[in-house]
Image: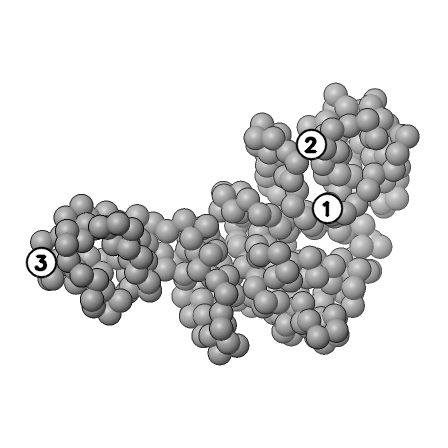
Amino acid sequence: MTKTAPAERAVAFTSVGKAFGPLRAVDGVDLEIRRGETVALLGRNGAGKSTTISLLLGLDDPDTGRVELFGGQPEDAVRAGKVGAMLQEARLVPRVTVRELVSFVAGRYPAPLPVDEALALAGIEELAGRRVDKLSGGQTQRVRFAVALAGDPALIVLDEPTAALDVEARQAFWTSMRAYARCGHTVLFSTHYLEEADRHADRIVVMDHGRIVADGSGEQVKRSAGGSTVSFDLAGRGTEGLTLLPGVASVEVRGDRARLRTRDSDATVIALAELGAIRGLEVAAASLDEAFLALTAPVTSLASLTSLTSLTQETV
């Protein structure tokens, strides 16, 4: 992680830890997010994402370390209207219209967005007169987004923002989010849709076992976990020695075809060529899904996890 000047930081975690009984939900996290940056937070269920977001918003206090938003305490930033949040478990007030709800929330901030602008950014102008308890799941999610935007926060935190949205609504949401980010706002979102993280985030942070195991652009994260796949027909050959080829991180055999995950596809292909004629050779970049699975694969010991984290940080 590259250090950022204090004036440029929106978020700063310094050696942050949080435990619930014997479970260390967040374990020594160091994280900085620059102002104006769009960051995706990824991890399996139980990886520590939700606790990290709670600490960031001041909903929980760290047991160790320090969390800062815009150079101060999280609760101060929230109170000053610098932070908006769209959380999965948040419930909307029933028996009010969408406009009434967004107007009420906007009125709690010192310099809110005009209500019509918040509705337009969330793509829900046509829902303004509808009662919030009469909306579909996807419509409700878009209202939550408008509520998070209402105060015109400098930092917006989105927890699984496109859950319950259909394909068209998801595309509309990301169009709105990018427009908001282009105005210089900072965005942190968690998602299980990895293609969304790859497409829309400037930077991806992967958590596992309460720790950050990767931090960089989508391309950097892919490379850190074995950035390419080299596959070819075995044509009756054995697989002996394939794991020893330059760059190879793992070997998978499907039928009569070998699939090598490699950090240096050029070196791997050259070494394969030296072994003799290779049929059906294909080289493809690893997907973010493959990198994520490699980075969050179950490990048998703390030493294994530490080794994987170190490798990721060196690559990124």
Q: In the image, what residue occupies the spot 63% across and 73% down? A: 28
Q: Could you tell whether 78 is left or right of 10 in the image?
A: right
Q: Is residue 243 above or below residue 37?
A: below
User: Of residues 133 and 15, which is closer to you in this image?
Assistant: 133
Residue type, numbered disc 3: Gly
The residue pinned by badge 1 equals 88
Element type at mark 1: loop
Residue 231 visible here: no
Tell me the residue at 33%/64% (across/down): 249
Amino acid on which disc 2 is placed = Gly
Q: Which residue is mark 3?
A: 276
> Looking at the image, do the residues carrying marks 1 and 3 touch, with CB atoms under 8 Å apart?
no
Q: Nearer the viewer, residue 239 or 221?
A: 239
Q: Dot 2, crowdedness within 10 Å: few (<14), some or many (≥20)?
A: some
**Residue linked to disc 2:** 138
For marks 1 and 3 on the same chain, the one whose residue lies earlier in the sequence: 1
312 relative to 212 in the view: left or right: left
Q: Position of residue 31 (x, y in %)?
A: 61, 65
Q: Earlier in the sequence, mark 3 or mark 2?
A: 2
State the SS at label 3. loop
Can you tell which mark lies on residue 165?
none
Which three-letter amino acid code belongs to the residue tagged 1?
Answer: Gln
